[in-house]
Image (tube, helix red, strand yellow):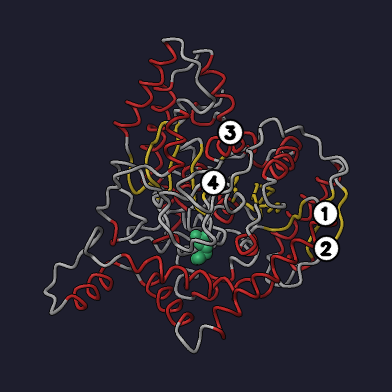
Amino acid sequence: MPELWQLSIYEAADQLRRRELSSVELTRAHLDRIAQVEGRVKAFVTTTEQQALREAERIDQRRGEGAQLGPLAGIPFAIKDVICTEGVTTTCSSRMLERFVPPYDATVMVKLRQAGIVMLGKTNMDEFAMGSSTENSAFFPTRNPWDLDRVPGGSSGGSAAAVAAGQAMAALGSDTGGSVRQPGALTNTLGMKPTYGRVSRYGLIAFASSLDQIGPFARSARDAALVLQAVAGYDPLDSTSVDTPVPDYTAALTGDIKGLRVGVPAEYFVEGVEPGVRTAIEEAIETLKSLGAEVGECSLPHTRYGVAAYYIIAPAECSANLARYDGVKYGYSTRNHAESLIDFVMRTRDEGFGKEVKRRIMLGTYALSSGYYDAYYLTAEKTRTLIKRDFEQAFEQFDVLVGPTSPTVAFKIGEKVNDPYAMYLNDVFTIPANLSGIPGVSIPCGFSDGLPVGLQILGPSFREDLLLRVADAYQRATDFHMQWPALPDAKKAARKRG
Ligand code: GLN
């Protein structure tokens, strides 16, 4: 018998509906799991036990009164701390917002609450979503449940680790350059970045507005379909959300990918991809072939310029977005004596922001400054167009593209944190989807020396249904996504570390 925290949303929803299980029981099982492992994993910045139990009770009560509730009603979720939650601190893992309590819910939260979810808490992240390891949190690093000495990826590392360790059945993250897919890959969970405009960004604290997109973490494509269904759709409060119908994602999971044209970009199998990652991806491609997919090689020739373009565009947009943190209206204010208003703002920003955030603001301000604008920002935007065209051409011949999500498995805590360039290179395969707006999903596809490897599936805009169909067909044929980390107990882990 699996533990309650090991159930899929799909299974739990069925038992809840038949009233064989209550949401209070399911929520308690997750709170117990949090109590058991959180001291080692450190996925949460805030947990909301009392509120969670109240929400669960309310759902049980409504069900008891005969209300017909949807599949997410009573399901325990974790939410990245970049998404505004009314009345619950939303820190972005930054000193700047350490005490910020939003007066409103993000649109995704309004939708999830309408669907009846139970929120267990807010998850740790790289400060303002800048990073690939969750080490840039101003509070503490999150650990990878598969090896507590390693990072869970980032920036949504807390959400990924919570789902991987069985502390939540699903989670939301945000993906600007890979921050849902890469931690998904590194923790053996499914992480999806929807098409730019598919999910409202209203109430998502902005990092780089032309790239940011909220996406789900789940343990299976079937569960992810339910979460995406709940959060997708047009929102008048976000002018970049797109008014196009949301398909039935669960109905898309036919299990059939016969004749599907799968492209394998040559540029995704280059030096720097670890041999263990490459082997797992090659085996996954063989599995897709055995399911009837027609696999062929393709080329995305501008891939190698993606990282450079992204690390101009994202900092440029961040430098504008983060200008609002001046210590006046909300967020941190310096308590030190200030000589003038300018001095006050400078001290506030110096004390409130961490090292990586300051680096990005400086890079972005420089790239946008007069005299450098054309050389950096404009060139980066032109490169973005070329990367977009690469995909448009590839999708003329192929339905989806597959390759590694990350060139490496989870790296050691501390290994890359002082080498920003090495950290940035980790995003080489995830960034192009953000630059071009297309959707991507990472799914578990094997292990290299006991550490998870993620297969990235990319598709044309608004074809999340197709990505989920491929992911689900693959998961019907494999059981990588069903594996749980051993999570050695604290004493053993300490002995191992010596
Ligand atoms: N790792 C990338 C960065 O540091 C992507 C972050 C993200 O997607 N939020 O910017």
Point 69% across, 40% down: residue: 465
Q: Residues within 10 Å of mark 2 (few under 14, many from 20)?
A: some
Q: Could you say which disc has been placed on residue 226 in the image? A: 3
Mark 2 near mark 1, Cβ–Cβ under 8 Å?
yes
Of tags 4 and 3, the one toward the viewer is 4
- What is the C-alpha distance between the residues marked 2 and 4? 29 Å
Q: Earlier in the sequence, mark 4 or mark 3?
A: 4
Label 2 near ligand 1 (CB < 8 Å): no
Q: Position of residue 347 (x, y in %)?
A: 22, 74
Quadrant of the drawing holding the C terminus: bottom left
- What is the C-alpha distance between the residues marked 1 and 4? 25 Å
Badge 1 is on which residue? Answer: 398
- What is the C-alpha distance between the residues marked 4 and 3? 14 Å
Amino acid type assigned to the residue bearing label 4 in the image? Val
Dot 3 falls on a residue whose secondary structure is helix
Badge 2 is on which residue? Answer: 298
Q: Earlier in the sequence, mark 3 or mark 1?
A: 3
Amino acid type assigned to the residue bearing label 3 in the image? Leu
Badge 4 is on which residue? Answer: 199
Of tags 2 and 1, the one toward the viewer is 1
Dot 1 falls on a residue whose secondary structure is loop
Q: Earlier in the sequence, mark 2 or mark 4?
A: 4
Q: Position of residue 143 (x, y in %)?
A: 45, 53
